Image (cartoon, rainbow, N blue to C red):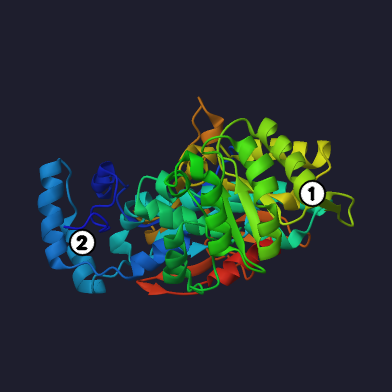
Amino acid sequence: MDTKTILHDVDSYKVSMWKQYPPGTEYVYSYISSRGGKYSKTKFFLAQKFVRDLASLRVTMADVEFADKFWTAHGEPFNREGWEYIVTRHQGRLPLEIRTLDEGVVVPTGTILATVVNTDPKCYWLTTWVETAFLRDVWYGTTVATQSWSIKQVIKDYLEKSGDLAGLPFKLHDFGSRGVSSNESAVSGGMAHLTNFMGTDTAIAIIGAAQYYDADLYATGFSIPAAEHSTITSWGRGSEAIAYENMVNQFSKEGSIYAVVSDSYDIYNAVDHIWGVQLAGLIREKKGTLVIRPDSGDPLEVIPRLLNSLSKNFGAVKNDKGYLVLNNVRLIWGDGINEMSIRSILRVVVDMMGYSADNIAFGMGGALLQVVNRDDLKFAMKCSAIRRRKFTREGEFDEWVDVFKDPITDKGKTSLKGRFAVVRGANGEWSNVPIGNDTLVDNNELKIRFRDGQLLNMQTFAQVRANEEKS
């Protein structure tokens, strides 16, 4: 038994769909896209994880035997003959063709991201079978990547205005591993975030990026030594200063960065007196960069007060853009962070107080990897064409038939009809272009990634990161 097997990783109702298509159906063609929602653009990601998992699959007769017993007991009519055919005719590999855009591209919602069609007419039902698992990877990976990318644009704008863009890759740190529902979510969501940033505490995402995208294990994501409340409070309230001093002595040296949570008792006393007076000389002497983490309260009240205190005790210089940059110290805020709170904090820090965005970074946890759903970008995988064998008085012939839905109660759920290529115009605009029976599209951005169990046109993580710039 394996919960990840494609024979069971499917919505139950789909098991009966092999009996539901019109007589003579030989090919079923489906596409995946975002129909709109929270963002006007999507950053496409995570299809390669699915196709690599699919390519490693080899269905066996033992799998089919177990699936037959399972689905029959479950109340569904299992297509045993069809799956046995896959085992004997295709050596357990799935006869499908999957095309996708290059991952990492940012495209308008509504742009087709992926298509699936069976390659063996006896397996017309297989396209629908893989929808559950394929759509799950694509909607989740793309939604997390899109949210992270959108926040990146906010921070980028403020850095361009007030600071140094070189620091952008480390301005939103992934704190989300403990806040997701599973190890797999941490890997998938953590990889999606890493397409935009390089700061993460979700270390298993780096392993995933190496496994699925051939990422460099030692140069894809980074973190720094950081204290948590337990290591500070274990010294006792009366020894808070000693706990901080230990952090400086353990981790500070020229060029190093280390973070210390400082709100275990009184954040203002910690910053005004312990950091700002008692340990200021040691911090300067060690020449590392201290990142203070306040972890409670209203950031629009706490951060301004801390910035002014740190500026008073450590000094600040104006950069060439006219904004203040603290000496020796920085702040990171990781409590209740989302795109709206980041906008609000940067507006106060940069626009109202005149401090550079260089002074602050953000940590984002559950809101980054967990507080997303399929409806955020209205994702769907829809059948848009089938090919049928028909018999008439003139003889036997095949034809592609458009398939679509157009519910009178919700026009936003109207689906596309036909088969498509995705092309880019001279000005970089993206378009879904219908394909006729004999139409060839040379510049189709939907490239074959999987065909009959074989992987094609795989992308590295470095390529995925670079593709954003080609968007």
**Residue at image mark 1:** 356
Relative image position of residue 144 (x, y in whole percent): 53, 49
Disc 2 residue type (three-letter): Trp
**Frontmost residue, 282 versus 426:** 282
Residue drawn where x is 55% and y is 72% of the image: 219
**Is residue 276 something one can see in this rendering?**
yes
- Distance Cα–Cα, label 2 vs label 1: 61 Å
Quarter of the figure that contains the C terminus: bottom right
The crowd level at tag 2 (other Cα within 10 Å; few <14, some 14-19, many 20+) is: many
Q: Give above or below for 169 relative to 213.
A: above
| Horizontal relation, residue 123 to residue 420: left or right | left
Between circles 2 and 1, the one closer to the viewer is: 1
Q: Give above or below for 347 relative to 445.
A: above
Query: Total label count?
Result: 2
Relative image position of residue 180 (x, y in whole percent): 40, 45
Residue drawn where x is 53% and y is 63% of the image: 250
Relative image position of residue 51 (x, y in whole percent): 40, 65
Disc 1 residue type (three-letter): Ser
| Horizontal relation, residue 285 to residue 384: left or right | right
**Frontmost residue, 367 versus 465:** 367
Relative image position of residue 298 (x, y in whole percent): 62, 30
**Is residue 42 something one can see in this rendering?**
no
Quarter of the figure that contains the N terminus: bottom left
Lower position in the chain sequence, tag 2 or tag 1: 2
| Horizontal relation, residue 424 to residue 364: left or right | right
The crowd level at tag 1 (other Cα within 10 Å; few <14, some 14-19, many 20+) is: many
**Residue at image mark 2:** 83
